[in-house]
Structure formats: structure tokens, C-alpha cells
Image: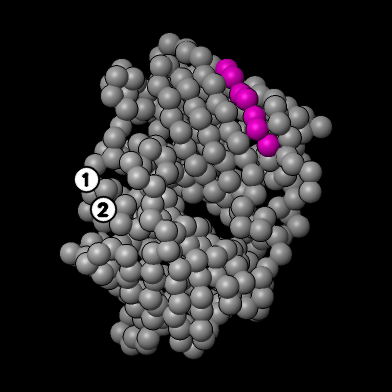
Amino acid sequence: MTRIAILSSLLAVCLGIAAQAQTAPAKPGPELQKLHVFVGHWKGEGTIQPGPFSHVGKENFEETDEMILGGFFLQMRVTLKEAGRQDLWVIGYDPVNNNYPATHFLGDGRVTTRTYTLDGSTWRYTGKFSAAGKQYQFRGTATFAADGMSYTNKGEFSPDGNTWSPAWDEKITKAKPGPKK
Amino acid sequence: MKRIAILSSVSVMLLMFAAVALAQSSAPKPAPELKQADVWVGDWVFSGTGKDSPAGPEHTVEWRPHCHWILSGIFLEWDSNWKGNGAELQFLEIAAYDPIKKVYSVSGFANDGSTWALTSTFDKDTWVDTFANGCRNTFHFSADGMAASGIQECEQKGVRWTVWQLKGTKTKPAAKK
């Protein structure tokens, strides 16, 4: 399917710049390079607090992150042991808003989105999700250690944007670096 | 980076399977309706013609999608290569099925940084993609699911025009389970 369709607009625009594209394929800019800090194989552990989540309590997970589509997107494949599911993330860069939109495909069938902004070594994120017919907001930070070999991920959620409760607290350690270039 | 703004409507999708609300801790099984989308699974080669504008010259188009189920059969993924008018594009699309609305919500990502969202339906042998900008793709599948034809139509200033028309065959069917 194709969306190609995409391609309606996409194709029209792409082909509109075909001459340029032929000689100079699009290259990811420096902002996308910053996503490379995630590339590699990671192991994580943490706790999900009681709340409208598919799993609460201790959690262990592994994730493999790589740049795809010519380096324009970061793909994360996550296996969550206790939750018993696999998730997929696709994260890109929006130069207009100077942020990193992420689409999260959960192994339980849901799709959520969140937006990251980078502040030094800390990735801040906000997003929304639904559970049992209710809408919730969440926000959090992923803060990298100076050596880039680990990061902490802390988040909280709110039913109304006013009252926030702890949601998750994780420590993620790089088990295997990304490929050398 | 060339980000195509038109398409950068990052999908704000919050699809929920009904079962999720009731039993979030148990892994859901794919909705039975997903079975019909099996016809996409495999490697395809489509070829045909396309135009950049209603009055533009025709050029040849080739589309090679590899389609497969991911995340335990909950989502359908297309990995595609598109060639037309001297340009080449790689893109990834992932479809989630909403059993309540009975539609597929598709998120797309391309190797120029662009993203898009569309909604798809499947009725008998016909798959229809609908874009927010009014463009529409229609694919008809053969009875054996090994061939398909597709057309994309858009509207510009009240005039409906054909962006591309393709015919394709499945060169590699889905792997036996």
C-alpha cells in the first residue's frame, strides 16, 4: 500500500526537487546526530508505580536502538520481560519546532506519541496516552551519564495536567555499543 | 535535512484495542479482521506511470514494498523503495488496526525525514488509503492475492487527477507459519 501515497504530496515534492535529489540525496543534519547517543544494545531495570499502566511493579527490559532510513530516524526495539510484550519506537527530528517527535507502537496494540526536547545531556519528553477510556498526560526525563554508557529515565503522569504522580523510574545501561562508522 | 512539511503531521494516534482497557496485563491477540490484510504480506514489485502535476508529463514509476507483520502480528509494516522521475525514496510504514472504527491507521517515515499519517480500509478485495489532504489510493487485489493494481487520485482546484497508476505482482509470498 503506499502509501506511497504519501507520496502524493511527498512524491510531488520529492520529484519536484528531483533534479536536486539526484545529485544530492538528503542528509541528516546535526540535530539528528544527537540521537546517536541512543544507538546500541541496552539493558534496563526499574519500577512502574501503580497507575493506569499495562504493567506495574518491577520491570526488566532490553532494547536495541539503531538509526534507520539514512539516519533520519532512530528505531528502538524494546522487549519488556515482566510486561510480556515487545514495543517499537520511531523517533525523528522536527526542524520547525526544534523537537524530536516519537511514535510508540506498543505490543498491546496501542499507538502513542510523545515529543522530546534536548537540554544538555537530558532528554525531556511529554505525551499523552489512553487507558480504560481515560486520557492521561505524562512527562519525564532521560538523563545520560557523562560517558554515555547509561542513563536514567524518570516519568510521572497526570489525569488533568495539574496533579502529577510518579510513574516510572528506570536505570538503563549500555550492554553493547552501536556499530563503528 | 529536507523535511516535507505537508507530511509532517506526526500521527497523533491513540488506538486502543477494546481488550486493552479491560485486560491490560494480558498480551492481546491480533483482531480477526487483521487476517484480511495478510494479502499484503510478502515482497511485491509494482510498476506503472506517474505525474508530478495534473498537466505534467508522465514518467515511469517502480515501487517495491516488503510487507510483514511485526510485534506478534499486531502491526503490519511495509519497507518500501520507490523510484520515479529520477528520484528514489525509501520509506517505512506501520499500520495499526482499530477494531472499533474498523480502520487501519498508518504512520509513515521516509529517508528524507518526512512523516505522514493516513487511514486505510479493506473491503473484500479493495484496499483504500485516505490522506488528510484529500488524496486517495485504491488497490484491487486478484482472487489469489498474488497480483494487484493501484491508483492514486488527488484533487487540485476542484479537478480530480491521477498521480500514479501501478500494477504489481507478489514475487515472494509470506513465509509459511
Tag 2 subunit: A
Horizontal and vertical percent for residue A49? 46, 87
Q: Horizontally, is B147 left or right of A162 in the view?
A: right
- Kindly state the secondary structure of the residue where label 1 is placed: helix
Q: Are marks 1 and 2 in contact (CB under 8 Å)?
A: yes
Residue B8: image location, x then y, percent: 36, 46
Residue at mark 1 = A30
In the picture of the structure, the residue carrying the numbered disc 2 is A34
> What range is drawn magenta here?
B42-48
Q: How many marks?
A: 2
Q: Tell me the distance, in whole angstroms, between the alpha carbons under discs 1 and 2.
A: 7 Å
Q: Position of residue B171 (x, y in %)?
A: 70, 27
Amino acid type shown at disc 2: Lys
Mark 2 surroundings: few (<14), some (14-19) or many (≥20) residues within 10 A: few
Determine if residue A104 is in view: no
Label 1 marks a residue whose chain is: A
With A78 as the anchor, is A35 left or right in this view? left
Q: How is the image coloured?
A: one colour
